[in-house]
Image (cartoon, rainbow, N blue to C red):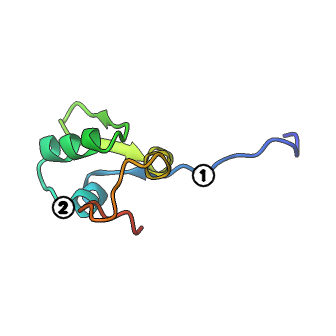
Amino acid sequence: MNSNNTLLKIDIIDFPFLQKLTGFNSPAKQAECLRQHNIYYIEGRDGKVVTTSKWLEQASFSGAFSANDEVNLEF
């Protein structure tokens, strides 16, 4: 591999982590919270949503979160 290529580490944020992040146990409520904060996510066949650390990072830098927001991005 060329040494000029840089690989980015992108973590998958799964259901248990989204429970902590959003404060919701329901996948539908988690999806609603992510939509409200302009965070891209994918819904699996089981109805559970997943996102990535990159998508969370992009949303946090875009100003999607206010100072008094309930979403906890400390991970």
Determine crowd level at label 2: few under 14, some 14-19, many 20+ residues with C-alpha closer than 10 A: some
Q: Is residue 43 above or below residue 57?
A: above
In percent of the image, x 26 and y 34: which residue is there? 44
Q: Is residue 2 above or below residue 9?
A: above
Question: Where residue 54 sits in the image (x, y, percent)?
Answer: 51, 47
Judged from the image, the secondary structure of the residue bearing numbered disc 1 is loop
Residues at marks 2 and 1, CA–CA distance in whole angstroms: 25 Å
Q: Which mark is residue 43?
A: none
Towards the viewer: 9 or 33:
33
Q: Which mark is residue 23?
A: 2
Number of marks:
2
In percent of the image, x 18 and y 61: which residue is there? 23
Q: Amino acid at mark 1?
A: Lys
Determine crowd level at label 1: few under 14, some 14-19, many 20+ residues with C-alpha closer than 10 A: few
Q: Farthest right residue?
A: 3
Which is closer to the viewer, label 2 or label 1?
A: 2
- Report the side of 63 relative to 48 (left or right): right
Q: Which mark is residue 9?
A: 1
